[in-house]
Image: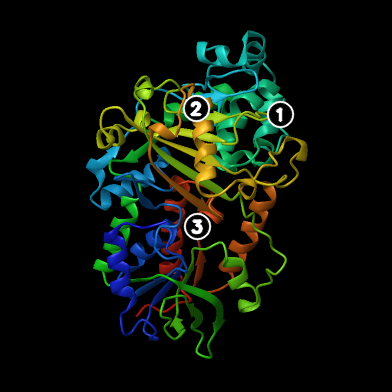
């Protein structure tokens, strides 16, 4: 996968800085995903000379751009949740406020063994705010919708002891809501099963809001939707969310920071003077000598934080196991198919459990979802993106019988995978789509991009955070710790940087 030319040029220029291996760094950030870049931005703006290192070929983590059939598109995240306003504030601070856009209000669908149906227009991770709404009744059927509506009158004690999202929704609203509404959405968002996900990790604030509404899930969803910023629950950026990475890299480097890619951090130790010694392994071609970096402040914005902290200042994290999440494969198709002009399945389709006629877990109809993509593509040309990959087996006690055993390792490669995607798109959209309408395609594979926020994972994260708290001068951040999505990652990264700046054990220059 490629990163756009602006970011590549900025990074490669800084990576060759002659003093990149000096001991003069006042802060080192390990990981150049959005979390690492946000933390670095806070540090450089506080006046600290900061180095960001990442083993990948380009910064951004799961927020990247790529070119497909002449279109510049998102290769990873293509939207962000509007809750808490943190991402919108960051975009505004980077000069991108005028480019924030809302998706088209077409709604999405679920592809189920019982037939296709719309997902709730007003809901949260598939949990309906109005169980008897027409779109909910169409997908659930009247008997299951009536069962879901019992949530409004059931005692608050029902589901009070549930620890997972699936368990809570099943107790309050019934099996059909879990299988037909929540499972498709959670599978698309987290590549996981609802029975694997802790309630507030999957839907931050839902537990508190449910308590405030005497146990009712539907009323809790209404309350959360009402308190959210006006407009859509998600937003994007005209030209692609990957522009956020470009802007972050530009801002960090403009304030004296350096972003160094293709550099793996293999160890962190303490020097005699108390500073950190960060051992790096170079991955450039031709290779440059590996370097030991010296710093008094360390940000670990990487899932490898546990391994790097283990043994440092007495931390014992050898047995800590963070969830790796599901490897995810995204297949983007650019199609000349006028039949898709009508957006037959709205902005996209999420696939429910037990479905055997497709292998994808989700499809996004990008030209129906985002006006900027439709404008760039032109009349009659459409962009659809299919997502493949669910986690193998349960996380934290889920039922193996309900987990999708098909992972990305079972997918074919190359043109064969594109053919699979075309067949899946035809089934999900209800429109025949063959090689004759294909104008371009791209395949992107992601690893460690969607850790499942299970109870076991949250306990592991708590152990790593505790170890970092006990290590003066070190902090951790990233999706692996904060949860999936930019709305979780951005405020957590800012808080990590603020804690580092306020650490009384680290002398300011």
Q: Are marks 1 and 3 in contact (CB under 8 Å)?
A: no
Residue in the foreground of this view, choosing between 492 and 307: 307
Of pointers 2 and 3, the one earlier in the residue sequence: 2
Are the two marked residues, 2 and 3, in contact with CB atoms closer than 8 angstroms? Answer: no
Q: What residue is shown with label 2?
A: 426
Q: Quadrant of the C terminus?
A: bottom left
Residue 257 visible? The answer is no
The circle on residue 478 is 3
Quadrant where the N terminus is found in the figure: bottom left
Dot 1: element: loop
The earlier-in-sequence mark between 1 and 3 is 1
x and y, in percent, of residue 257 in the image:
31, 71
Q: Tell me the distance, in whole angstroms, between the alpha carbons under discs 1 and 2.
A: 39 Å
Seen from the viewer's position, the closer of residues 55 and 177 is 55
Nearer the viewer's eye, disc 2 or disc 3?
2
Give the number of the disc on residue 159: 1
Establish if 395 lies above or below 297.
above
């Amino acid at each position: 996968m490629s990163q756009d030319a602006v970011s590549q040029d900025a990074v490669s220029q800084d990576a060759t800085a002659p003093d990149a291996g000096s001991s003069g760094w006042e802060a080192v950030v390990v990981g150049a995903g959005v979390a690492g870049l946000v933390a670095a931005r806070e540090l450089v703006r506080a006046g600290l000379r900061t180095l960001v290192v990442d083993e990948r070929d380009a910064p951004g983590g799961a927020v990247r751009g790529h070119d497909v059939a002449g279109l510049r598109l998102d290769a990873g995240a293509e939207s962000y949740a509007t809750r808490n306003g943190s991402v919108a504030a960051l975009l505004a601070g980077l000069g991108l406020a005028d480019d924030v856009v809302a998706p088209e209000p077409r709604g999405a669908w679920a592809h189920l063994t019982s037939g296709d149906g719309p997902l709730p227009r007003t809901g949260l991770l598939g949990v309906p705010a109005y169980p008897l709404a027409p779109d909910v009744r169409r997908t659930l059927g009247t008997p299951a919708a009536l069962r879901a509506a019992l949530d409004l009158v059931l005692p608050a004690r029902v589901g009070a002891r549930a620890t997972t999202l699936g368990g809570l929704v099943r107790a309050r609203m019934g099996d059909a809501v879990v299988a037909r509404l929540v499972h498709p959405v959670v599978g698309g968002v987290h590549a996981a099963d609802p029975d694997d996900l802790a309630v507030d990790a999957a839907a931050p604030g839902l537990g508190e809001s449910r308590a405030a509404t005497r146990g009712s899930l539907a009323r809790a969803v209404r309350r959360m939707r009402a308190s959210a910023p006006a407009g859509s629950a998600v937003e994007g950026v005209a030209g692609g969310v990957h522009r956020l990475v470009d802007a972050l890299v530009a801002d960090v480097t403009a304030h004296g920071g350096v972003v160094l890619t293709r550099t793996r951090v293999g160890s962190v130790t303490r020097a005699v003077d108390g500073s950190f010694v960060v051992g790096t392994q170079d991955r450039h071609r031709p290779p440059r000598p590996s370097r030991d970096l010296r710093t008094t402040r360390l940000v670990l914005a990487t899932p490898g934080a546990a391994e790097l902290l283990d043994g440092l200042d007495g931390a014992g994290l050898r047995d800590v196991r963070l969830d790796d999440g599901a490897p995810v494969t995204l297949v983007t198709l650019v199609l000349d198919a006028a039949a898709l002009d009508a957006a037959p399945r709205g902005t996209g389709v999420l696939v429910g459990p037990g479905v055997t006629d497709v292998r994808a877990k989700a499809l996004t109809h990008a030209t129906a979802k985002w006006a900027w993509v439709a404008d760039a593509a032109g009349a009659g040309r459409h962009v659809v993106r299919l997502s493949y990959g669910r986690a193998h087996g349960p996380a934290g006690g889920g039922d193996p019988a309900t987990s999708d055993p098909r992972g990305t390792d079972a997918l074919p490669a190359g043109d064969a995978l594109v053919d699979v995607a075309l067949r899946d798109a035809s089934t999900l959209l209800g429109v025949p789509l063959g090689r004759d309408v294909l104008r371009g395609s791209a395949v992107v594979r992601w690893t460690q991009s969607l850790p499942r926020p299970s109870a076991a994972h949250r306990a592991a994260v708590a152990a790593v955070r505790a170890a970092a708290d006990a290590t003066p001068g070190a902090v951790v951040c990233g999706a692996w710790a904060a949860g999936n999505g930019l709305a979780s990652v951005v405020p957590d990264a800012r808080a990590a940087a603020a804690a580092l700046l306020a650490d009384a054990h680290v002398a300011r220059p």
